[in-house]
Amino acid sequence: MSQNRGTLVSAAALAVAALGLAPTAHAQDKAPAVAAPAVAVAAPAVADAAAADGYLYAWEHAWKGGRQATWYDDSSNWVDRNMRNQASSVHNNGFAGAYDDVLLYWDAGHGGAAYCLRNGNYLMDMRYDRFPYNGTGGGQAMNDNVSSHRWVDYCQN
């Protein structure tokens, strides 16, 4: 896995300062000075970035059902999480930026046909998804056929 992965500055971690303003009272003014209410400055909404946790998720059944496995790094063999050729649903919940897309491979060792799952995307029911024709296993159903994965900088398809 790349050393660039995981570098993220969270907008949620930024502190926001509240400003209080009061008008200046002059000797010639007849009305008493009244302090203006404090104005809070809101940080921009970043719901998608805040929800990302840097992991690839796989589930045994469609629609995120059954056993779940997670990976932060590359895996050359999904047997390490007892998920090789058993996943029916996947979600790329990686951080946006460098190495945020995931190649899902038909064979162990990052071999065979590869499907690129873009950052933030998921396949909820892989019975209807097929590996592209770019290696051994091309055209095969992805359901119960993913054996390894690797984080990549971008999808080429």
Image (cartoon, helix red, strand yellow):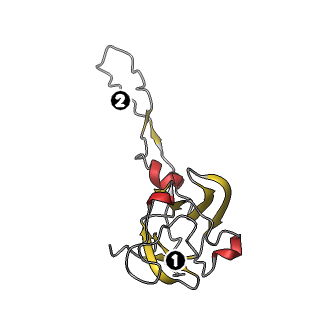
Instruction: State the residue in front, 121 or 87.
Output: 87
In the rendered image, residue 44, in percent from the top left (x then y), is placed at 40, 47
x and y percentages locating residue 87 in the rendered image: 59, 64
Left or right, 52 with reference to 21: right
Taking the view exactly as shown, the residue that stands out farthest to the front is 140
Mark 2 is on which residue type? Thr
**Residue 149 seen anywhere in this rendered image of the structure:** yes
User: What is the quadrant of residue 36 in the picture?
Assistant: top left
- Seen from the viewer's position, the closer of residues 111 and 46 is 111
Residue sitting at the far left:
28
Asked whether the viewer can see residue 98, the reply is no
Please count the marks in the image.
2
- Tell me the tag on residue 22: none
Whether residues under marks 1 and 2 lie with C-beta atoms below 8 angstroms apart, the answer is no
**Which SS class for mark 2?**
loop
Q: Which is more foreground, mark 1 or mark 2?
A: 1
The spot of residue 47 in percent (x, y) is: 46, 48
- Residue at the (32%, 72%) spot, across then down: 157
Query: Which residue type carries mark 1?
Result: Trp
Tell me, for residue 24, which label it has, or none. 2
Q: Earlier in the sequence, mark 1 or mark 2?
A: 2
